[in-house]
Structure formats: structure tokens, C-alpha cells
Amino acid sequence: MHYTVQRMIINILVGTMTGTAQMCAQEMELALDGDDLQVVTHLMDKLEPTIFTDRQAVYLICTSTYGQGDVPDNAKALYAALGAQKPDLAGVRYGVFGLGDRTYAETFNFGGKRFDELLSGLGAERIGERYTHDASSGTLPEEVAIEWAEAWVANVRETYSAA
Ligand SMILES: Cc1cc2nc3c(=O)[nH]c(=O)nc-3n(C[C@H](O)[C@H](O)[C@H](O)COP(=O)(O)O)c2cc1C
């Protein structure tokens, strides 16, 4: 008999302007991808709301913040399409690793916050707390990302085994 064990899929969706969020995603992918976990990193550029149709997968929004608390340019089309089409995202599980800078006190980490509010408003369920990296903190986001993502995945596994 031959059994295939299905690996849990984590789709990391990256919103970035100057590549920091992408670097974080790559580090998280390297750290997490393995025997029972498949990590796929997607830049948000060409994504459509249908990316969220796989209810077996888990989604990780990894995005920075620009302008006046806006999502980065490469995330704008997906963000707008979700808001316009309002797909029912019940059963979708996601996490948020946000990047920002506290110098922008009024709009700190709004990119991740906006996605979080949008997805939960469409019925998706966030796993764990939204992470808010601060570029002025002196910590390297790509290092923090690995540590955070490992703890987040442990959290995800708990919700899987509870389901
Ligand atoms: C022009 C500009 C505007 C920014 N606006 C915000 C903001 O409103 N809120 C925030 O928290 N961070 C803001 N940031 C900080 C970035 O989100 C932060 O540096 C992030 O690490 C960049 O990641 P990225 O390279 O993936 O785009 C801004 C940065 C720049 C250069």
C-alpha cells in the first residue's frame, strides 16, 4: 500500500515597495518549508481574490505600508478587488506579518491592518496576533520574521488538530 501524506500549504502573499517584505517572506519560506509543510510565496502584483479559494491552505499576508497608511502599490489591485467583489471568505484562515515604521505614528503598520480588517470583514479567520514590525526599532525584520513565523505555524497546527 502506498500512502501520500498531504502537506499543509501556506501561501505567503507579499505586498512590498522596496523588497523588505519579500525578503522576510523568502526567509520564512526557507525556514518553514519541509516534510509536512509546503510554503509558496506569491507577490501580490497579479493576484486575484480567487487566490483565497483553497480552504485547506493557510494564508500569510506579509505586507509593508506606504503613502499615508496605504498598502504598497503591488498590493493595491488585490486589495481593491477584494473590497469590490466581496467574496465570502468563511473558512479561510490567515495570519498577518506587517512592516512599517513608528515614525509614521498616525498610520503605523496600516498596510497589514487594512488587509486584516478587510479579510476578517469578509468572514476569514485570523490565526494569532497581527505582527507589526517597526523599521525604527533596530531589529532586522527578516530575522524577527523567522521566529514569529515558527510560533505562528505552531498556532496554525493547533487550530488544524482542533478542526
Ligand atoms: C514613502 C514612505 C512612506 C511610508 N509610509 C508608512 C506609513 O504610513 N506607515 C508605516 O508604518 N510605515 C511607512 N513606511 C515604512 C515602510 O513600511 C517600512 O520601511 C517597510 O519596512 C518597507 O518595506 P518594503 O521594502 O517591503 O516596502 C513608509 C516608507 C516610505 C519610504
Image (cartoon, rainbow, N blue to C red):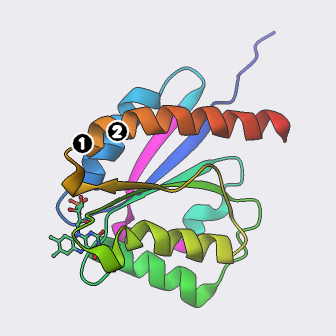
Which residue: 42% across, 32% down?
147
Please name the amino acid that badge 1 sits on: Thr
Q: Verify CB contact (< 8 Å) between mark 2 and mark 1.
A: yes
Q: x, y (%) of residue 101?
A: 25, 64
Q: Position of residue 100 (x, y in %)?
A: 29, 63
Q: Could you say which is closer to the camera, residue 75 or residue 105? A: 105
Which residue is painted at 57% across and 53% down in the image? 129
Residue at the spot of label 1: 139
Q: Position of residue 126 (x, y in %)?
A: 64, 57
Query: Which residue extends farthest top?
Result: 1
Q: Classify residue 135 by image quadrant.
A: bottom left
Left or right of residue 8: residue 133: left
In this rendering, the count of numbered labels is: 2
Residue range highlighted in magenta: 38-49
Residue 106, relative to residue 16: is it above or below? Answer: below
Q: Residues within 10 Å of mark 1 (few under 14, many from 20)?
A: few
Please, which residue is most extreme toward the bottom here?
Answer: 84
Could you tell which of marks 2 and 1 lies nearer the N-terminus? 1
Q: Which residue is mark 2?
A: 144
Q: Residue at x 80, y 33 (%)?
A: 161
